[in-house]
Image (cartoon, rainbow, N blue to C red):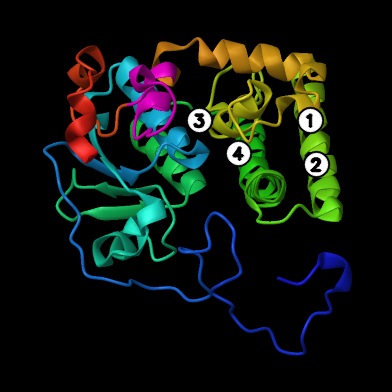
Amino acid sequence: MTDSSDYTPPKVWEWNKENGGRFATINRPVSGSTHDKDLPVGRHPLQLYSLGTPNGVKVTVMLEELLAIGHRGAEYDAWLIRISEGDQFGSGFVAINPNSKIPALLDRSGPKPIRVFETGSILMYLAEKFAAFLPNDPASRAECLSWLFWQMGSAPYLGGGFGHFYAYAPIKIEYAIDRFAMEAKRQLDVLDKRLADHEYLAGSAYTIADIAVWPWYGGLVKGWLYGAAEFLRVEDYKNVQRWADTIGDRPAAKRGRMVNRINGELSSQLHERHDASDFETQTQDKLKFAS
């Protein structure tokens, strides 16, 4: 691999499979399936195919919140997609999400299954389907959706930018880390200033905006992402810390963060979720769902 200080981009870029990095074996410049594999289908109306990354947690928190307020139609089966093993390139998964990214949702509650992909789309779909966590008032709804799409546009700078170069890249590039650390801190400052005067991002109500942002920026300030809490001095963002703790104390958020999680303490993992009782009987045997 060429030292970054000596690198000159070629006239035409070519894919180098040996470029290294944690995700080198699954990243590629083309789309589509690499193998035939049908997806499992459970007994509930909603079928979720995911992994307990920040993007996956958004949807499982939303589903658990819907169930917590009594929407029985939000019952779901959560199937584990191991992205490090290329499950997202199976033909069944690609049929639901042609972008081959988790999570992907299949709503089988109607006469014809409906596929939904991209987390902002999934959260909006569920919020509208169940009339929950999305304000009706036009001004409040606009504020909620503005923060939802803020997250969709900003997270790539945190995950694919800062997280990649700080934690996963095969070589440490000072310029890249500095550039994305600056952007991550700017985003935290945006949130901190908003939350100084508002309990939640859209105002006084907990919405899909909070559900979308919390796994990323809440996780960052609580030290769950990239081992970067000290590096970014996340303790400076006191309003984000308060907000992250408030959401983190919600029982549905705690449950949602467990689903499809395959790292950390075993007691915090539930590889697959097929019934609410799975949380109560979560044991080492339960982890064998996906082993």
Disc 1 marks which residue?
231
Residue 117 placement, left or right of 185: left
Report the amino acid beneath label 3: Leu
Q: Nearer the viewer, residue 68 or 174?
A: 174
Disc 4 marks which residue?
148
Q: Is residue 165 magenta?
A: no
Residue placed at 66% from the left, 40% from the top? Answer: 146
Q: Would you say the residues marked 3 and 1 are in contact, meaning their CB atoms lie under 8 Å apart?
A: no
Task: Indicate which disc, 4 or 3, sits on the residue closer to the N terminus.
Answer: 3
Indicate the quadrant containing the C terminus: top left, top right, bottom left or bottom right: top left
Is disc 3 surrounded by few (<14), some (14 to 19) or many (20+) residues within 10 Å?
many
Q: CA distance from mark 1 to mark 2?
A: 9 Å
Kindly report which numbered mark, 4 or 2, lies closer to the viewer in this rendering. Answer: 2
Is disc 1 surrounded by few (<14), some (14 to 19) or many (20+) residues within 10 Å?
few
Q: Would you say the residues marked 1 and 2 are in contact, meaning their CB atoms lie under 8 Å apart?
A: yes
Q: Is residue 255 magenta?
A: yes
Disc 2 marks which residue?
181
Report the amino acid beneath label 4: Leu
Task: Indicate which disc, 1 or 2, sits on the residue closer to the N terminus.
Answer: 2
